[in-house]
Image: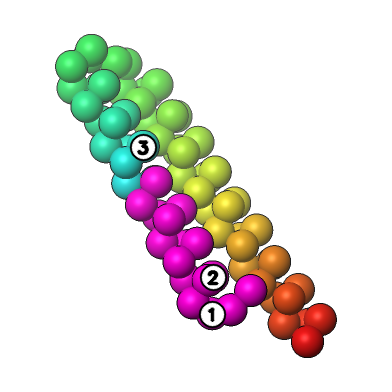
Amino acid sequence: MTDEVLMTCIKIVIDNLSYKIGDLTLMYEHKQVDPDDFYKEASCIKSDSVESIMDLVREYEESLEKK
């Protein structure tokens, strides 16, 4: 994996995070979801995104070690 590939993958994760939080916000505004549920769901989405980024970084580091 190259630096460019890593950065592209991270950008995709961040873009997906933005879309998911945006969708969740719209749902909250239109359906009047309980704020606690909103924050729990947003927290899960953020945690999943951070985990995905950390996995990408680990994979990148492993690819550097193999070189």
Say what amino acid the circle numbered 3 marks.
Lys
Query: Quick check: 26 left or right of 45?
Result: left
Q: Quadrant of the N terminus?
A: bottom right
**Residue extending farthest left:** 30
Q: Nearer the viewer, mark 2 or mark 3?
A: 2
Q: Residue at x 22, y 14 (%)?
A: 32
Asked whether 65 falls inside the magenta stretch, the response is no
Which residue occupies 79% across, 82% down?
Answer: 65
Dot 2 or dot 3: first in sequence order is 2
Residue 10 colored in magenta in the image: yes
Disc 2 residue type?
A: Leu
User: Which kind of residue does numbered mark 1 sit on?
Assistant: Asp
Helix, strand or loop at mark 3: helix
Image quadrant assignment for residue 55: bottom right
Distance between mark 1 and mark 3 Cα atoms: 26 Å
Q: Is residue 40 left or right of residue 5?
A: left
Which residue has dot 3 on it? 20
Left or right: 1, with 32 as reference point = right
Which residue has dot 2 on it?
Answer: 6
Front position among marks 1 and 3: 1
Q: Is residue 23 left or right of residue 49?
A: left
Q: Are marks 1 and 2 in contact (CB under 8 Å)?
A: yes
Against 62, residue 50 (above or below) is: above
Where residue 15 appears, as percent x and y from the top left, is: 36, 52
Q: Quadrant of residue 29?
A: top left
Region rendered in magenta: 1-16
Which residue was labeled with disc 1?
Answer: 3
State whether residue 66 is above or below residue 55. below
